[in-house]
Image: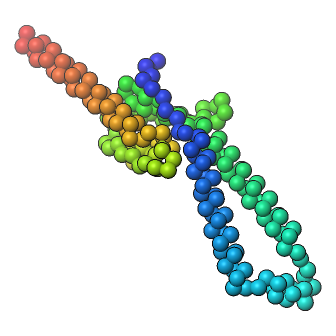
Amino acid sequence: MEQILSELKPNSKKIVLSNFLKILMIVVIIAIILFIINLVVDFNSIKEGLAIIGINFSLGPLIKVGIYVIVIALSSFLLFGYLESNKIRYVFTKDGIKVYQNLLLVQLNELFIPYNNIVKVTFEEMPILNAGNIILELTGTKDRNMEFKFIDNPQQVAAYILKLINEYWAKYYAERSEEYKYQRILGRE
C-alpha cells in the first residue's frame, strides 16, 4: 500500500452556506420582481376579472403554499449539497493524487492523477467564504481539468501540491541520473 502524505476534503459547511446565499439571492430577486409587478399591476383588478368568469381565489393560501414550497426546496437543496460534498476526498501520495467518491459507505469511483500528468496548478479564491477552488490542468488523461471545489486556504493547498510535484520530479531525475551512471559504468566493462 502506498504511503499517504495527506488527505483533503471540501468544506461541507461552506458549500451549504454558499448554496443558502444563492437561494437567498434568488428569493430576494423574485420578491423584488413581485413587488414591482404589484406596483404596476393591481392584483385586485385581476382577482375581480377572474371572479367574473367564475374563478375565485384568495392570495393568503396561495402565498402560504408558495412559502412551503420554497422552504421544502431550500431544505432539500441544502441537504443534497451537504451530502454531495461529504462523498469526495483527495488523498496525496508520493506519486500522485487519488480522488475518491463515496456514497455513505460504498465507494463509487476512484481516480488516480499521477504528478507527471499535472501541467499547471491554479486556484480561485472566494473571499467571503475564505475558501476556493483548485484547478489542475492535466495532460495524458481523458479529462483536461480536475477541479477541487470549496477547499479551505486554496493558496496554501495549491503551493503544497506544487511542492509535491517538484519533489516527485526531483526524485524522478535523481533516479534516472543514477540509472544512467550505472549503465555507463557497466557499458565500459
* 21 with respect to 68 (left or right): left
Residue 31: tell me if it is visible.
yes
Residue beneath the point at 17% across and 22% down: 177
Residue 138: tell me if it is visible.
no
Residue beneath the point at 46% across and 18% down: 1
Q: Is residue 182 above or below residue 52?
A: above
Snapshot quadrant of residue 25: bottom right
* 117 with respect to 131 (left or right): left
Please tell me which residue lies in front, 11 or 187. Answer: 11
Please tell me which residue lies in front, 142 or 37. Answer: 37
Snapshot quadrant of residue 114: top left
Quadrant placement of the C terminus: top left
Residue 105 position within the rendered picture, expressed as x and y whole percent measured from the top left = 66, 29
Residue furthest left as drawn: 188
Residue beneath the point at 19% across and 19% down: 179
Residue 71 position within the rendered picture, expressed as x and y whole percent measured from the top left = 75, 56
Residue 126 position within the rendered picture, expressed as x and y whole percent measured from the top left = 46, 50
Please tell me which residue lies in front, 122 or 182. Answer: 122
Q: Is residue 181 above or below residue 168?
A: above
Residue 66 position within the rendered picture, expressed as x and y whole percent measured from the top left = 78, 65
Q: Is residue 75 above or below residue 166?
A: below
* 58 with respect to 6 (left or right): right
Please tell me which residue lies in front, 149 or 180. Answer: 149
